[in-house]
Image (cartoon, rainbow, N blue to C red):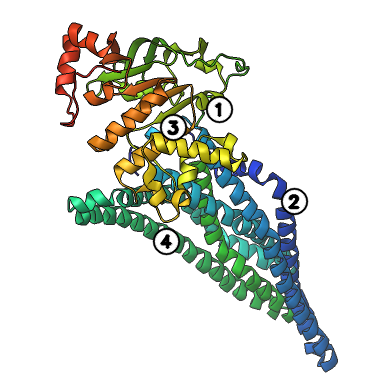
Amino acid sequence: MNDSTPQSPRSSGTFRGLARVIPFARSDLARLGVGMGIMIVSSGVALGIPIALEALVDGPLATGDPVQVWWAVALIALLGFVEAALVLLRRVTVLTPGTRIDSRFRNTIYRHLQDLPIAFHDQWQSGQLLSRANSDVSLIRRWMSFGLVMLVGNVLMIVMGIAVLFHWSPLLAGVFLLCSLPMFYFGTRFRSQYSSLSRAAQDQWGDVSTAVEESVHGIRVLRSFGRGADSLTSFAGRTRAGRNLEVNKGNARAGLGFWLVWVPDFALAACLLTGVWLASDGTLTTGQLFAFFATAAVLAGPIESIGFLLGLTLEAQSGVARIFEVLDESNTITNPENPVTATPSGGSLVFDNVHFRHASQSPDDPDLLDGINLDVRPGETMAIVGATGSGKTTLTALPARLYDVTAGRILLDGVDIRSLDLSALRTRIAMAFEDATLFSETVRDNVLLGRDDLRDADPARSDAVLAQALDVAEAGFVYDLPDGVETIIGEQGLSLSGGQRQRLALARAIACAPDVLVLDDPLSALDVETEARVESALRRVLATTTAIVVAHRPSTVTLADRVALLDNGRITAVGTHSELLANSAAYRHLISSLVDDPGHDSTEEPS
């Protein structure tokens, strides 16, 4: 497994681990219990057939009465039909609970992933999360609907069958059990070996899922650099490792299967030798000896299935452990117990001695943000400039609580943002990122993503908000798409150009009509003329909206009323563009080093 994937420090027994499924299955336990009851009854019916055979051999066959033979044959046929009907009923009974448990798990995992902080997603591979939400949940469904019921039913059937064997002959049953004792040893060894193999295989297939996702999303890069063959070689290595683990799992199952077949057969051979001796001296009738081996034949299937069912149980336990590694992750960014509800809405944003560091950082590492003090006035546009790695993107992620400050506080209109309801906070702060992410939805749904209030609103109002946002972002190209704003733009919007995706992401932020707008270089992919038109339209929006704009080129600075220079996690200067050019050598050096398009004047005054 990839070392970057978090591991759970906890380990528990198989059944203790599987017991964590109970809260998801609580409402369906009764129906699963009915399924197990049906399984037990069908097992009893199956074991009734040898009893009927014993009566047949010692009765009608011994006396030669053909009428009684036909009645015995009819009884055995009826028992077989009843057993088959019960098997059908059991499968129908347990099917629905398994699918409902599957649905609850998937919904819970998705909801939890949505709630977990960005720091969690920074650390986990997406393929590992997909593997847990899909493959592992499917394993649990199979185990709940099939493995659990069959394992309990077959174990009880074996217990009842052994009791029946003791009924025929305690001596023969004792010989059978004594010869079967090695199965407990091989079963214990199998459990230890198979648990580790199962976990390793599931983790490996999670890495394979990650590789598939990365290669699909990065197909343009792989092809442009001609690295498709290298990517395939790396992928083949991952799948080969997964295949080897599956082969090892198969070998472990085959080894257990060998003993589960051979040991009972050896026990039957010993019982045959003993049974013939008992029958010869009259201790055991021919019918009883025949019924004993008929019962042993009925038990052969359940005994052989134990290996498969135990393997499925261990895989399910590993799947449960992997799923709860995610579900046990706590959400550190939560709503306050008593959120502040009545707050002003001017858009004042204050960073008060803000520090931030990732939990994974070494104690010796400096804070990424080291005492930020910044006052963004209502309606003001503040540009953040700094060298690569200075902390600009981290700074912009804090107001919406994508991360929480590790010290200090951020005030929105005089209220600590940690005192506000998260949903309310994130409706007041909208963000547009340089790396624009779109969803496999219509243009309308992507742009109006943050406007739940328009979901059931008058269509004319919704259209007006959409049109205004598209107009400001210079995203009128959407009207030329095949279905206009109802066009489904595809996964991550990759059917669009980078500039088109950025403009739609910008329109999405504008459509929210937030108190505070955070723009992390959202115009980097635009050409000179389009950028100029977008900036001109943005000025109308920014005139009445508090904004923080991360500037990676001088032209973006022209949108700002003031500029803050960020250097190694600290604000070292704040002022207008002209003031900083006149008074800050570090700012002049930074501005001169930024690459700008030829059509822009890097010393133009903000307007």
Upstream in the sequence, badge 3 or badge 1?
1
Q: CA distance from mark 2 to mark 1?
A: 38 Å
Q: Position of residue 305 (x, y in %)?
A: 56, 64
Residue 211 against residue 469 in the figure, above or below: below
Q: Disc 2 residue type? A: Ala
Q: Disc 4 residue type? A: Gly
Of residues 576 and 288, the one drawn nearer to the viewer in this rendering: 576
Give me the disc on residue 250: 4
Residue marked by disc 1: 423
Comparing labels 2 and 1, the label whose residue is closer to the camera: 1
In which image quadrant can residue 473 be found? top left
Comparing labels 3 and 4, the label whose residue is closer to the camera: 3
Q: CA distance from mark 2 to mark 3?
A: 49 Å
Give yes or no for contact between labels 3 and 1 (Cβ–Cβ under 8 Å): no
Residue 537 in view in this figure: yes
Comparing labels 2 and 3, the label whose residue is closer to the camera: 3
Q: CA distance from mark 4 to mark 2?
A: 34 Å
As helix, strand or loop, the secondary structure at mark 4 comes to: helix
Residue 301 falls left or right of residue 349: right
Residue marked by disc 2: 30
